[in-house]
Amino acid sequence: MDSPERPHLEAWLRYADDLGLGPFYLDRAPQSTPDVGPFSDSRAAESVPAPVSSAATAPSIAAVAPRRAPEPPIPQKPTAASAFTPQVSGPSLFEERIENDSLARILDDIGPNCTRCKLHKARTHIVFGVGSPKAQLVFVGEGPGHDEDVQGEPFVGRAGKLLTQMIEAMGLRRQDVYICNVVKCRPPENRLPERDEIATCSPYLLRQLGVIQPKVICCLGACSAQTLLNTNQGISRYRGEWFDFHGSKLIATYHPAYLLRNPPTKSEVWKDLQKVMAVLGLEPPRKSKSS
Ligand code: SF4
């Protein structure tokens, strides 16, 4: 008879088998850490956009109007290695959120035919986000790829399937979390979003986060981490560290697409996910004696 943990265990075992690492939760020695460059996504490092411009104070959700050129999101400004330390205090961005804001209102504000940035030219669908509006965990990627553009849902291609595996290995289901991107339309040729595109579209991401108010935000890849942390530092500088994002805890890890190309890196990501699980009070499924 299946136990309630069985689906989680199976998902975890699939993920562990895929990694070839065995049971992570036994604190087995990690695989060798690859030399991760400053931009660790699957897309070309040299195409990573310049960092969003800096500002002295953090913006508010209320200050982010959907139809004007937005200020970039600036929760804090880590500029040096010493700045990459967990900061878990500070005012809540969401205290100043748009009154009665909702995911439906944000989607309505974007509209079905948004042309605010040049990414609209080649898109098929606007990929808004998917999952629970009450999720305690939000994954933020950079932008839709081909499959996402066709289907109108984030993370449904190969990288998306791996993300689903990761979520299930944490003992969750896709519908338990929320998944979205910095930009809602597919950058041509799978390039990274450019600075102006991020500046134009990221206010909607901020509003999504303001509505959901997750306990944990997990940035997938350098683009989302650099956007939300307002830094041009490579993700390897701060991957796996905790930051305060106006009341939510933010952690950055590698993009699933990068993991597909660099499987040994999965062990590092699993460590990050274990940190997320600890914050959320999630227990990894225990290995049964029969398995
Ligand atoms: S990426 Fe965002 S701002 Fe640009 S066209 Fe798409 S929805 Fe509009």
Image (spheres, rainbow, N blue to C red):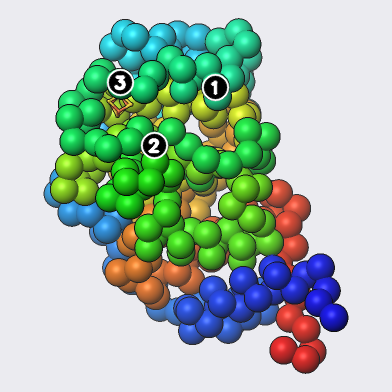
Residue 127 shows which numbered tag?
Answer: 2
Q: Which residue is mark 1?
A: 104
Image quarter (top left, top right, bottom left or bottom right) of the N terminus: bottom right
Displayed quadrant of residue 137: top right
Say the numbered circle drawn on residue 72. none
User: In the visual, does 74 lie left or right of 248?
Assistant: left
The residue lying toward the viewer, choosing from 283 and 51, is 283
Q: Are marks 1 and 2 in contact (CB under 8 Å)?
A: no
Q: Secondary structure at mark 1?
A: helix
Residue at image location 37% in from the left, 58% down from the top: 157
Please tell me which residue is depicted at 17% across the width and 42% down the height of the picture. 188
In this view, the residue in front, 1 or 229, is 1
* Residue 40 percent coordinates (x, y): 30, 56
User: Are circles 1 and 3 on residues that touch, CB within 8 Å?
Assistant: no
> Which residue is depicted at the point 78% across and 84% down?
288
Does the Cβ of the disc 3 residue fall within 8 Å of ligand 1?
yes
Left or right: 135, with 49 as reference point: right
Please tell me how crowded label 2 is: few (under 14), some (14-19), or many (20+) other residues with Cα within 10 Å. many
Label 2 to label 3, Cα distance in Å?
A: 11 Å
- Give the structural element (helix, strand or loop) at label 3: loop
| Residue that numbered label 3 is attached to | 114
Seen in the picture, residue 4 relative to 29 is either above or below; the reply is: above
Quadrant in the picture for the C terminus: bottom right
Q: Residues within 10 Å of mark 1 (few under 14, many from 20)?
A: few
Q: Amino acid at mark 2?
A: Val
Pointer 1 or 3: first along the chain: 1
In the rendered image, the residue lying farthest to the bottom is: 290
The amino acid at mark 3 is Cys
